[in-house]
Amino acid sequence: ARKRGGKNGVQLFDSNMVDIARTRLEIEQSIEQGLRSGWFTAHLQPIVSLADGRVAGFEALMRLDHPERGLLPPAEIIGVAEENGSIGKIGDCILSKSIASLAAISKLDGLADSYLAVNFSPLQFEPALPARLAALLLENGVTPARIVVEITEAVLMLDNPLVREVLDALSDLGCRIALDDFGTGYSSLSYLNRFPVDIVKVDQSFTRSLSSDQPDVRRKSRMLVEGIRTISHQMGCAVVAEGVETAEQWDILQAMDIEFAQGYLLSRPLPLEALLEKLDDFAPSQAPGRRAAAL
Ligand code: C2E
Ligand code: MG
Ligand code: MG
Ligand code: MG
């Protein structure tokens, strides 16, 4: 291939495409080296009961702690990892590290029953997953009831019998299933019917709109969130609001009888050591404003 600039030139590839290829190669190398060198970690973000401010659980969020490039977020990694087949190994690593973290957190006052929510890519749903998870749980002294498997509608949309089989097996094992980013995909409601869903996570875009400075947006998003809540409750699902950043959003969600909140107002996702230190800030008696200030 020939690259020629200028007005009459045929530009077969531009510098932008070269950048994209280089970035992709860098990510692939980071993943490969990260798996070999133990750079993958799970940061944990508390999920808090809106009724009393108690910490109910934690979501494990993947990070690649690269010695030169810093903390790489999942957005950079997951697409590439799904394409090159490394998502399975990364997922196993996140699973074992976050379950070990939950075992450590369990020793703290009032957190013996706290749960761990783990995100799964559809490609992780292989027949051996439930048995592998069960073994990991046994090893760490964690009961399956304390595990929440987070999937997005995209997973269910695949309509893959294997996904269904594995989800049913995880559910039979005693794990709960959460539908993540709810309301952003297609035909959301039918999934509540067809799959063993226990928890609905309202996407952070709805939470943000609740405190929009445009009255019309506020009013409509409130109706949407109330609608999601009502349907979820009628289907026997608990509701988590994602992306709660302000005390105002907290108050609105609390008044709506939504069970749980997750977001920067309460805490950013943190590495285990930092989280263990912070957990004192979550005493049930403290008001959300105080919690926000504690960050
Ligand atoms: P998610 O599962 O919906 O996770 C919530 C995302 O929102 C996280 O981004 C979290 O850091 C961010 N977040 C939490 N509170 C707030 C807030 O108050 N404001 C804002 N603006 N953001 C907030 P993160 O960690 O970058 O993860 C992005 C997505 O990557 C996740 O979205 C999830 O879909 C995926 N992901 C993360 N970890 C894993 C993993 O271990 N495996 C798989 N397959 N996917 C993962
Ligand atoms: Mg999630
Ligand atoms: Mg989400
Ligand atoms: Mg999300």
Image (spheres, helix red, strand yellow):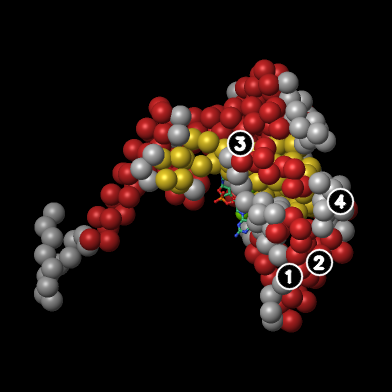
Mark 2 and mark 3: span between their CA atoms?
Answer: 32 Å
Mark 1 and mark 3: span between their CA atoms?
Answer: 33 Å
Which element is circle 2 on?
helix
Which element is circle 3 on?
helix
Please report whichever mark, 4 or 1, sits nearer to the chain's N-terminal start.
1
Q: Are marks 1 and 2 in contact (CB under 8 Å)?
A: yes
- Give the labeled residue for mark 4: 285
Q: Residue 156: horizontal and vertical position, in percent?
A: 64, 46
Mark 4 and mark 3: span between their CA atoms?
Answer: 24 Å
Mark 3 C-beta closer than 8 Å to ligand 1: no
Please report whichever mark, 1 or 3, sits nearer to the chain's N-terminal start.
1
Q: Please, what is the three-letter code of the amino acid marked with disc 2?
A: Ile
Residue at 38% x, 33% y is: 32
In the visual, does 32 lie left or right of 167? left
Residue at 79% x, 42% y is: 56
Question: Which of label 4 and label 1 is nearer to you?
Answer: 4
Q: Please, what is the three-letter code of the amino acid marked with disc 3?
A: Glu
In the visual, does 90 lie left or right of 253? left
Which element is circle 1 on?
helix
Q: Please, what is the three-letter code of the amino acid marked with disc 1?
A: Leu
Query: In the picture, residue 139 is in which quadrant?
Result: top right
- Give the labeled residue for mark 1: 210
Please report whichever mark, 4 or 3, sits nearer to the chain's N-terminal start.
3
- Give the labeled residue for mark 3: 273
In the visual, does 67 lie left or right of 46? left
Query: From this viewpoint, is residue 180 visible?
Result: yes
Q: Residue 108: horizontal and vertical position, in percent?
A: 76, 32
Give me the disc on residue 252: 2
Mark 4 C-beta closer than 8 Å to ligand 1: no
